[in-house]
Image (cartoon, helix red, strand yellow):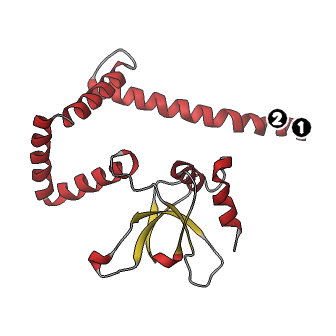
Amino acid sequence: MSRLLKHFLKGVVLVAPLAFTIYVCVRLFTTIDGWLGIPIPGVGFVVTIALITLFGLLASNLLTRGLLAALERVLERLPFVRLLYSSTRDLLNAFVGEQRRFDKPVLVTPFPGGVARAIGFVTQDSLTSIGLPGHVTVYLPQSYNFAGSLLIFPTSAVTPLQADSADVMAFIVSGGVTALPQSSAALTTQIQQP
């Protein structure tokens, strides 16, 4: 009986991630198809990708760049819209834009004198503008979540990690379950040192 249970659990580990991925993809495709009202499955998704790419192409044109800048100025003047637009724009730029922010993984000691360490990303190299010279902001993503905490540390309390930022983000978000590639050996060495 225990052997049968072992095989069942192994099957769950193999099937559950695959089923979840397929479910999310199907929901994404059908939702986007529903928005556009196209009865052919998947065509709405392809049209959406094409439109987004077209907008990206237009945004790099000199003429449309001026129009987009004018639209952005209008959005920045509207109180609630400004908060939504600027924070969404900055978040997307941090991950995939030209001004990526999550590209400096670091190791920090959250409590002075403590032995616990946290892995995060430096998002601002200087806080002199708000009266905190010699300090940086470190974003600490939460495991199994799309949330996190932003903490401020003296630069002396931040240790840069020699690791790929995408690998570090996957490591953190998975709760340390995702294995780091061999190239990130420096990260595991620094984590093991107290």
Classify 117 as above or below 131.
Answer: above
Residue 69 versus residue 62 in the image, above or below? below
Whether residue 137 is visible: yes
Tell me the residue at 30%/18% (across/down).
38
Helix, strand or loop status at disc 1: helix
Kind of residue indicated by mark 2? His
Q: Amino acid at mark 1?
A: Arg
* Left or right: 74, with 33 as reference point: left
Q: Residue 176's spot in the image, x, y percent?
A: 64, 56
Report, in whole angstroms, how far the alpha carbon at label 2 lies from the one at label 1: 6 Å
The percent coordinates of residue 51 (x first, y second) are: 26, 27
- Residue denoted by label 2: 7
Q: Work out whether residue 142 or residue 37 is closer to the camera in this orientation and state it.
A: 142
User: Callout 2 environment at 10 Å: few (<14), some (14 to 19), or many (20+)?
Assistant: few
Please give the name of the residue rendered at 52% of the width and 77% of the height, measured from the top-left corner: 157
Where residue 74 appears, as percent x and y from the top left, is: 9, 51
Image marks 2 and 1: residues in contact by CB distance under 8 Å = yes
Q: Which mark is residue 106?
A: none
Give the vertical position of 184 relative to 2 (above or below).
below
Residue at 30% from the left image edge and 25% from the top image edge: 50
Q: Name the quadrant containing residue 2.
A: top right
Q: Which mark is residue 3?
A: 1
